[in-house]
Amino acid sequence: MLVLSRKANGTIKIGDNIEIRILEVKGDTVRIGIEAPKSVDILRGELIHSISESNSEALTLDATLFSRLTNKTTE
């Protein structure tokens, strides 16, 4: 992992077509802007984590439901 320190209005370039700009630093909050092609997905980490948890929960529920259904058909 590369760790950089930037002040407000500082930028970071990733490749030729992605730029991250530090817009504001206020206390423990940093506002950033990201310029990237529309073909690049940009998602918040907590959103990805939440979706992953929901998907895992759905799989567990499906397996439990499937188990109940198959047990009823064999009785």
Image: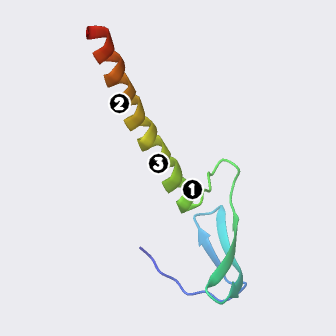
Residue position for label 3: 52
Image vertical order of residue 75 relative to residue 3, above or below: above
Give the numbered dot on residue 64: 2
Measuring from the top left, give residue 48's x and y in whole percent.
Answer: 52, 53
Mark 2 to mark 3: distance in Å? 19 Å
| Quadrant in the picture for the N terminus | bottom left
Q: Residue furthest front?
A: 75
Question: Which of the two discs, 2 and 3, sits closer to the camera?
Answer: 2
Mark 2 to mark 1: distance in Å? 26 Å
**Within the image, what quadrant is residue 43 found in?**
bottom right
Give the numbered dot on residue 31: none
Measuring from the top left, give residue 39's x and y in whole percent.
Answer: 66, 47
Mark 3 to mark 1: distance in Å? 9 Å
39 or 49, nearer to the observer: 49
Q: Residue at x 64, y 82 (%)?
A: 29
Measuring from the top left, give residue 6's x and y in whole percent.
Answer: 61, 86
Measuring from the top left, give residue 47's x and y in whole percent.
Answer: 57, 56
2 or 3: tag closer to the N-terminus: 3
- Disc 1: CA contacts within 10 A as few (<14), some (14-19) or many (>=20): few
Tag 2: residue type?
A: Thr
Callout 3: helix, strand or loop?
helix
59 or 68, nearer to the observer: 68
Callout 2: helix, strand or loop?
helix
* In the image: residue 66, left or right of residue 22: left
Callout 1: helix, strand or loop?
helix
41 or 11, nearer to the observer: 41
Tag 1: residue type?
A: Leu
> CB under 8 Å between callouts 2 and 1?
no
27 or 36, nearer to the observer: 27
Q: Residue at x 26, y 10 (%)?
A: 75
